[in-house]
Image (tube, rainbow, N blue to C red):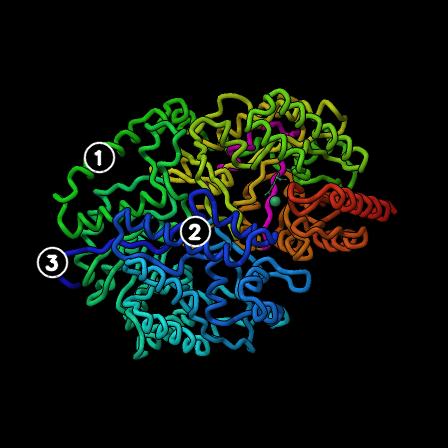
Amino acid sequence: MTTNSAPATAVATAHGYPRQGRHRELKRAIEGYWKGAVTAEALLATAAELRRENWRQLAEAGLDELPTGDFSLYDHMLDTTVAVGAIPPRHRAAVAADGLAGYFAMARGTQQAPPLEMTKWFDTNYHYLVPELGPDTAFAADPAKAVGEYLEARSLGHTARPVLIGPVSYLLLAKPAPGVAEDFQPITLLDRLLPVYAELLAALKAAGAEWVQLDEPALVQDRTPAELNAAARAYRELGGSADRPKLLVASYFDRLGEALPVLAKAPVEGLALDFTGPAAGNLADLAAVGGLPGKRLVAGVIDGRNVWINDLERSLATLGTLLGLADRVDVAPSCSLLHVPIDATAEREIDPQIARWLAFAKQKAAEAALLARGLGQGVSAITAELAANRADLASRAASPITRDPAVRARAAAVAPADTRRAQPYAVRAEVQRARLGLPLLPTTTIGSFPQTAELRVARADLAAGRIDEAAYRERMAAEVREVIAYQEKAGLDVLVHGEPERNDMVQYFAEQLTGYLATRHGWVQSYGTRYVRPPVLAGDISRPQPMTVDWYRYAQGLTDRPVKGMLTGPVTMLAWSFVRDDQPAAETARQVALALRAEVADLEAAGAAVVQVDEPALRETLPLRAAGRPAYLAWATEAFRLATSGVRADTQIHTHMCYAEFGAIMTAIEQLDADVISLEATRSHMQVAGELAEAGYPREVGPGVWDIHSPRVPSTGEALALLRAGLAAIPAERLWVNPDCGLKTRGWPETRASLDSLVAAARQLRGELAL
Ligand code: GLN
Ligand code: ZN
C-alpha cells in the first residue's frame, strides 16, 4: 500500500453525459433527417451545438476534465464499430456511398439489409447495437469521430479526455455474424483488433490528447480465465505501444472482481472504478490487491444511475480511504450520466420539498466537482455545502413521504403464508378448469391491442385540455367495446380489454400509486431516438383506490367469455423506474406487491376468474455477477407471489415474460407459482417449451407463436408448425395459444390476420387431437 499524503488538487470529471439536449433537439433533428425534412449539414450542426452545450454545462458545474466521444447520433457501440471498421458486408456499399445514411442503415436497416441486432446494455434500460464479427472480419482504424470531437472540445478551451469502448468489452459484447458458426468467439479476434486500437490511440495523441479513457464494463461480469488473460494481453500490448496517450481503463456497474488484479498490474496510467451499489466491494478489493501504486484512480463515488442526491460526507470518507490506495485520486459519477435525465431543476412541478432530494446529470456533475474540491482543499473548503447536503438528506429521511407508518406496518406484518397459494397447483388446476370451461389449447392475447393514432390523439387532446376526462374515458370505452367485439368474432377464448387507457404499463400504475413521482422532462435514452421517462419510486408505496377494476368491470360486462384482469408485476414496476437508494430493492418490491395484492383481491371480488400479472423485466435486472443472483431471484419471486397468492383456488393467475433467454431463470419461473405463463418463443422456435419440460415445469404454458416485433403475418401453417413443436414438449392439456407479447405496436390489419391464423391453427389441432 502506498502512503501518499493528500494531493494538492483532485480533478472532477465524468464518463459521459446525456446526448439528447434539454428539449430532445437531437431526436427531432435525427428523425427530421430520416424523413428528408432536415439536411445532413443541419443535423450535424445541431449535434455539434448539443456537444458544445453539454460541455458548457459540465464545465459550468465545475468539472475540470471533460469527456469527448461519448456523444452519439445513435449508439456508442455502433460508433465503435465504425471506429474499428467492422462494418457488416451487407451495409458496406451504403456506408461507402454516404457515411451518415449508411450509419443509420446499420442502426435501423433498409429494405435490402436488416439492421444490427439490438440488445440491453448490461442491466440498464439502454440498448446497444451488437457488433457482428467472424473469422473473416478485417478491422481498420477510423479515428475521424474520436479525433474530431476531441478537437472540437479543445477549440472551445476545454481540457478533454476522449472516451472509447475498450477492445476487450467490444469483443465480449459482440456476436457471430450471420452465417458464421454460432460457437465462434469474437474474443479470438483480439490480436487483429489491438493494432487498430493502437492506431486510434496514436491518432488521438497526435491530436493532442494527454489521456484517453477505454471503457471495459464487460470485465465486471463473471469472466473465464481465458477472457481475463485476453484482458491482460490487451493492456500489456496497448500499454507497451510507444506512441500513445496515457490510458485510463474504466469499469462500472459492478465490482471488477478477478479482473481487478489484472488491470492493477497492467502498464496503464489509471483506472476508473465504481464504488456505488453492487460495486461498493471494489473498495475492499482494491485494498486487498495493495492499491494502485503509481496510478491515477478516478473514483466513481456518485451513483450515475439513480436520481438521488449524494451523501457527500459518506463519499468523502470513501475518498479519504482511497487516498491511501493510489497515487492520485480524482472524482466522478460511477458511470456515464447517459442513464439519468439532464436537469432536476427543470422539474418545477415537483414539490420543492422533494425536489431538493433529486440530482440528475447536471447536479451529479456539480457533486463531483464539490467532492473534488473537498478532497483537494480539505473539508473546510466546502463546509456550507456539506451542511446544506446534510439538511437535504435529513429532510428526506424524516419525511412522511419516505416513511409511511401504515405501509411499514403492513409490510412488517407479511407472513410466509401470504406468499404462498393456499392450495397446491393440482387442486387449483382442477377447480379452475371447472370454472372456466375452456377448450383444449385455449387462445388468448397478452393484453394490449394496437395503440392507434386515434388513441394517441385522445391522450394528447386530454393533456392539452381540448377534451375533458369524461370525453376521454368515453373514447377509451369505445375502444374497449371494439376490442371485445372483435375478439368474440375472431373466436378467442380468454379475452383482454386491450389496455387503450394505458400510456405505458409502468407509468399507468405509477400515476395511481402514492409514493411514486412522475417527471416532466426526465427523459433518458432507451435506444436511438427512443426516450423513456421512468417514474421515480420516491417514498413508501400505497394504493389509495382501485386502479383497474372499473375498466375490468366494463369489459367483462360486454361479454360472457372470461376477460383477464391485467396488472404490471412488482419486479417490472421497479425495473422500469428509478428506485430508492435508502432501502433495499426487496423492501420497495414488497410495498409495491402489497398494493398489487389489494388490486388483485378487488379484481377477484369484481368477478375476474383470470388475473394476469406481467413480469417482462424479471430477467433484465438479474445481477451481472452470478453470485448476486440467488438473493435477487428470492426477493423477486417472493414479491410476485405476495402480489398474487391471496386469491381463491379457482382464480387463475397468469404471468407473462418476453425475451429470448430463459435459461438463467428457469427455477425462478417455477417459483412464481403462476397457473399459466405466456412467453416469447417464436424466434427461438419454441425452444423455451423444451427447456420448461426438461426442468419438469408442471403448470400451463403459452409459448408465443406470433413474433409481434415484426410486421409479418404468420400463416396458419406456421402457427401450426410452432404449436406442434410446443406439443412435443408440453401436453395438450397444459398448452395455450398466444402471441409473443402485447400488440400495442402493431396495426389492426396485421393483428386481425395474425390472430385469425392463431385461432385457425388451434382449431385444427383440437380437431386432430379429438380423433
Ligand atoms: N400486458 C402487456 C401488453 O400486452 C405486456 C407488455 C410486455 O410484456 N412488455 O402490452
Ligand atoms: Zn411481453
Nearer the observer, disc 1 or disc 3? 1
Rendered residue at 28%/46% (across/down): 61
Q: Assign a secondary structure to mark 1.
A: helix
Q: Quadrant of the N terminus?
A: bottom left
Which circle marks residue 19 in the picture? 2
Residue 537, how many percent across, how many down? 42, 35
Q: Assign a secondary structure to mark 2.
A: loop
Rendered residue at 56%/44% (across/down): 616
Seen in the picture, residue 348 relative to 304 is either above or below; the reply is above
Q: Amino acid at mark 2?
A: Arg
Category of crowding for the residue at label 2, using alpha-carbon neighbours closer than 10 angstroms: few (below 14), some (14–19), many (at least 20): many
Based on the picture, tell me whether residue 649 belongs to the magenta stretch.
Answer: yes
Q: Assign a secondary structure to mark 3.
A: loop
| The residue stretch that appears in magenta | 635-660
Q: Which residue is mark 3?
A: 5
Nearer the observer, disc 3 or disc 2? 2
First of labels 1, 2 by sequence position: 2
- The quarter of the rendering in which ligand 1 is drawn is top right
Category of crowding for the residue at label 3, using alpha-carbon neighbours closer than 10 angstroms: few (below 14), some (14–19), many (at least 20): few
248 sits left or right of 144 in the view = left
First of labels 3, 2 by sequence position: 3
Query: Would residue 720 be seen by someone viewing this image from the given angle?
Result: yes
Nearer the observer, disc 1 or disc 2? 2
91 sits left or right of 439 in the view = left
Closest to the observer, 598 or 320: 320
Q: Amino acid at mark 3?
A: Ser
Quadrant in which residue 225 is drawn:
bottom left
Q: Between marks 3 and 2, how big is the CA–CA gap?
A: 38 Å
Q: Which residue is mark 1?
A: 388
